[in-house]
Image: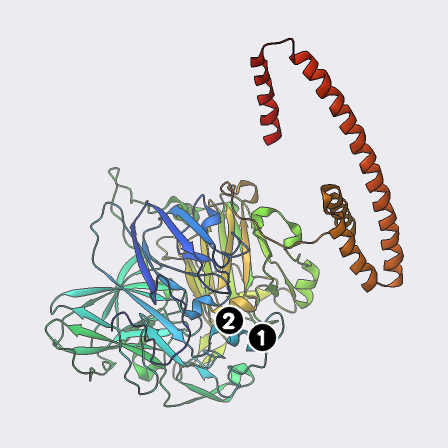
Amino acid sequence: MEEVITTDGVPRNVITVNDMFPGPTIEVVEGAQVVVKVTNKLLTEATSIHWHGLHMRGTPHMDGVAYVTQCPIMPRESFVYRFRAEPAGTHFYHSHLFTQREDGLFGAFIVHKAKHPIMPSVPVILHDWYHIDATPYWISNMFRIEYGGDGEYMLGAYERPFSQDGIKVSSRVFTSALINGRGRFGKNRAPLSTFIVASGGHVSFRIIHVGPDYPFRFSVDQHELTVTASDGYDMAPRSVQSVIIYPGESYDVQITGAVQPDLYWIRAQTLRTGHCSKCYPYDEVIVVPDDITEEVRAILQYQGVTPDRDPTTAKRNCSIENPCYVFNCPFAGYPKHLNTICINVNEAEAPNLPLEEDGQSKVIDNDHENSSNAEASDVTEIFLNFNFIIGSSINGRRFIGPTSPLHQNSTAATVSCDVEECLRSGCRCTHIIDIPYDKTIQLVMYNTFAPTSQTHHAVHIHGHAFQVVAMGYPTYNKTTGRYMQPNTDVKCKNDLCTDAAWRDGPPLLNLINPPLKDTVMVPANGYTVVRFRSDNPGPWFLHCHNDQHMNEGMALILQEAADRHPSPPKGFPRCGDFTWSSEEYQLSLEGNSRSGNSPRSQAVICVCVFTGSQQDVQTTALDINVLILSTVGGFLAMAIILAVAVYWIIKKREKAASVPLTVIAESVPLKRNRQI
């Protein structure tokens, strides 16, 4: 039974990796050279694999973003990824070609710290799951960037789920969800994932959200979670009742078996609290609570307890005396009466590091030290708008992907951005931002332009981790928890807010011990400020990790130190568009005729004559005359060459009669020349 792929008990197609769903967990030690041979056995689809959270320092061509860093791997083809395992921590791999991640192409990738004992841990992979394959869903998407579909699988405005802050959770119908590939749909009895803990011991979970859309609030009945890391980077431990996880994020948590040995529910619930009875305008939304619970469960089993039944446990009560702390809230806070307190990511802290011999704190990565202590003149600040001003976009630009990797230097592979048009009315183009080498890059990712800012976004940056140095939230009603007004720290400089600046200077930044992440939530009606050092040249993708938003155009490329990009390895695959002119076509035909293929060439030309217009017929007839003259001239030239060759052969034979036979060996270089 353990080898049967059951998902949530409803049959549908699944993409497997080595016949496994989720794909096999890859575990390596930091600094190791990793070699992964990917063979595409999909029947009709290309693919590529992105190694989420791994920096690909010096090997950007291994990042796995189809058409940005590599050509996609075609059916029956293989591609060998080779890269250094860094940084240490909880990461994962997944397809980076449209929507294949939704269908199952993903798995955990754990990098253990070098020179540290390897501690036992368990990957816990969350995934919102749908009974329609990703491709038909994407075709029906009414917001698709090419041609909008009929929206068959999307919710109407009054059907959409809302979180307690009055913000839309998703436009997509929630169907089901999985933990490590298992869940239940409705009241069926499909098997669930089970995790074992010893009484008085502990279990370490590496929670990874690989899903396409819905965020989850993860908890274990009657147990506290100790959050120790996010996206692979250690944090000062925090004891919480639950942690909210967005697509693309990971959290390391430790659970202590300190309660009565039994079976306990593990829950991952969406943020839904109700639906809107008044949906517009957005600052006047009325959310009506409903009894709909959208969740997936797994089981925490204490050693010695027989798993012959489902747990009967409930979530612990949150009281004034014992409130519930929730890590990574996308909003400023919960209603006061819920006795639930938010800990936002910007409130997290990097751990205190051990001291070196000189008494100075050890720095994990000099990049992050430099970005924290950088002088103002060394900081390049970039404002990025994540509002839906023209749909899913960044700074009013909906991303059109290139048709070949950027290292091929083909300008025809990209759609250039008209800066004036993009600022004025929005545009669709290959959005590329050049960033200089070895500078502190400060990204201000804002989502404050109401009414187009009514969704939280999880933003992932390839090739880097970053410091979360500030977050700004909207004002909210502490009694109801509802959003009231957008944050006003960011000032729009044009009508679409595609150009912005700080209203009264930047907010207070945490430059002492900010947390490190590679995927961070940008709150609706607020902003997030991150920093990193631009010392990893390459074309790095930046995008919302919500599949729908990314594929609709909420993405761009950070072209980091363009003049320093490493060259791809020898023989690296090339791809892209193909076209040829009428002149090139004609020259090709002439070349074939010289090779003795003239009858076939003439037959093709005849077809063109009969199917073309009158002008085409005249042009082609002229071409035939040219071809005939060329052919006659070619025969005359060949006759002359043949006569000269016969003459030299006769002369050579006469000379050979008077020299030793061994001189014939001089003909060997001629053979070598013909081979070259």
Q: Nearer the viewer, residue 298 or 79?
A: 79
Classify residue 146 by image quadrant.
bottom right
Label 2 Cα crowd, 10 Å radius (few <14 / some 14-19 / many 20+): many
Disc 1 residue type (three-letter): Phe
Classify residue 595 by image quadrant.
top right
Give the SS element for disc 2. Answer: helix
Q: Residue at x 21, y 52 (%)?
A: 118
Q: How many marks?
A: 2
Q: Nearer the viewer, residue 317 or 307?
A: 307
| Residue 34 drawn at (x, y percent) | 35, 48
Q: Residue at x 53, y 41 (%)?
A: 564
Say left or right for 106 vs 221: right
Q: Nearer the viewer, residue 252 or 362?
A: 252
Residue 676 seen in the figure? no
Q: Nearer the viewer, residue 128 or 636?
A: 636
Say left or right for 520 vs 45: left
| Residue 613 drawn at (x, y percent) | 86, 63
Give the SS element for disc 1. Answer: loop
Disc 2 residue type (three-letter): Gln
| Residue 456 drawn at (x, y percent) | 47, 72
Label 1 Cα crowd, 10 Å radius (few <14 / some 14-19 / many 20+): many
| Numbered badge on residue 143 | 1
> What distance separates the C-alpha of mark 1 from that of mark 2?
9 Å
| Numbered badge on residue 548 | 2
Mark positioned earlier in the residue sequence (1 or 2): 1
Quadrant including the C terminus: top right
- Picture layout, residue 660 above or below residue 669: above
| Residue 518 drawn at (x, y percent) | 41, 58
Say left or right for 191 vs 277: left
Say left or right for 119 vs 278: left
Q: Are marks 1 and 2 in contact (CB under 8 Å)?
A: yes
| Numbered badge on residue 455 | none
